[in-house]
Image: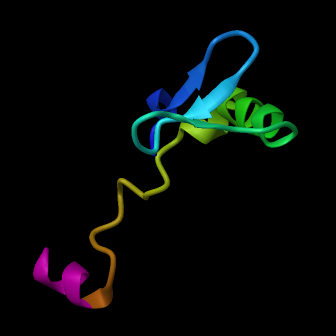
Amino acid sequence: MVTDDVARDGQHVALRLGDPPTPVPEPVAALLLDYLQDPTANTPAINQDSPGSSPAVARASR
């Protein structure tokens, strides 16, 4: 899921998990919007400097 999967029309929040988008009820909608406003929420969840995801992959990339 990416931030573009969250649809807002001013009063309602929906997730684009399929067609049509799924409505998100309160208080989950408020939590979701707060999370998206947090700058750390837009940071990739991977370590770009990591040589691999496992010791085997790290050895193969050397």
- Residue at the image position 56 percent from the left and 24 percent from the top: 7
Quarter of the image with the C terminus is: bottom left
> Of 37 and 44, which appears nearest the observer?
37
Where residue 28 appears, as percent x and y from the top left, is 80, 43
> Of 3 and 28, which appears nearest the observer?
28
Q: Quadrant of residue 55?
A: bottom left
Residue reaching furthest front?
A: 20
Where residue 40 appears, as percent x and y from the top left, is 64, 39
Which stretch appears magenta?
56-62
**Visible residue check, residue 40:** yes
Is residue 61 on the magenta stretch? yes
> Of 10 and 2, which appears nearest the observer?
10
User: Residue 6, relative to residue 48: is it above or below?
Assistant: above
Q: Main secondary structure of the magenta part?
A: helix
- Residue at the image position 42 percent from the left and 58 percent from the top: 47
Q: Is residue 48 left or right of residue 25?
A: left
Where residue 53 appears, as percent x and y from the top left, is 33, 76
User: Residue 36, relative to residue 53: is it above or below?
Assistant: above
Q: Is residue 7 left or right of residue 61?
A: right
Q: Is residue 51 left or right of residue 7?
A: left
Is residue 35 on the magenta stretch? no
> Of 60 and 19, which appears nearest the observer?
19
Q: Quadrant of residue 29?
A: top right
- Residue at the image position 49 percent from the left and 54 percent from the top: 45
- Residue at the image position 32 percent from the left and 84 percent from the top: 54
